[in-house]
Image (tube, rainbow, N blue to C red):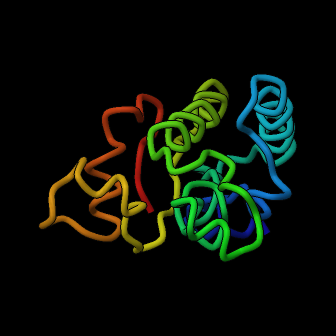
Amino acid sequence: FFNLCQKYGISVVVGYGFEDGTKSFFDTPQSMEETKGKIKSLIRAARHPAVIAWIVGNELNGPWNLFACDKDLAENFGIGKCQFGNSVEKLMKAVDGLCEVVKEEGILCGTALANVNLPATKQHLVGQDTWGAAAWIKASDRYMKHLDFWG
């Protein structure tokens, strides 16, 4: 597949997906190091000139993924809290930490956002006029030192 992409000038972006926040963990130093190791191994296994970037996570900001959400929403899903509580900062700093590994391998790194609002308790960070993915970018961009693009 990658060889055909290269032959026809097609660039490939590979995604590293997670299960939801009750099954995929990267909120502690140990779980973060384990996840970084997995990503590094996958990047090295899939190294090819056609691969120009990796996307770390898909819609991790979506409340249904249970990584960052308000407590009442977590309780609706039958759990005490989302993995990072309602902390936009902690989730996005963790994503940036994963992008650091991607960048160390010499590849561009991005993350795909769901077009959903910030947790209600965090909307004040961006004001009432910014919603959806734009609010997440506005609230998070300052933490994203290793992120090359938002998806």
| Image-based side of 100 in relation to 136, left or right | right
**Is residue 50 something one can see in this rendering?**
no
Q: Quadrant of residue 140?
A: top left
- Work out whether 148 lies above or below 5: above
Q: In which quadrant will I find the C terminus?
A: bottom left
| Image-based side of 46 in relation to 109, left or right | right
Coordinates of residue 39 in the picture (x, y in percent): 78, 40
Q: In which quadrant will I find the N terminus?
A: bottom right
**Is residue 103 something one can see in this rendering?**
yes
- Work out whether 61 lies above or below 39: below
- Residue lying at 24% horizontally and 47% vertically, measured from the top left: 125
Q: Toward the viewer: 70 or 4? A: 70
Q: Total marks drawn?
A: 0
- Residue lying at 74% horizontally and 39% vertically, measured from the top left: 26
| Image-based side of 46 in relation to 74, left or right | right
- Residue lying at 42% horizontally and 42% vertically, measured from the top left: 148
Q: Toward the viewer: 144 or 88? A: 88
Coordinates of residue 133 in the picture (x, y in percent): 35, 66
Coordinates of residue 129 in the picture (x, y in percent): 12, 67
- Work out whether 80 lies above or below 43: below
| Image-based side of 14 in relation to 141, left or right | right
- Work out whether 142 lies above or below 63: above
Coordinates of residue 91 in the picture (x, y in percent): 55, 43
Q: Quadrant of residue 135?
A: bottom left
- Residue lying at 41% horizontally and 35% vertically, measured from the top left: 144
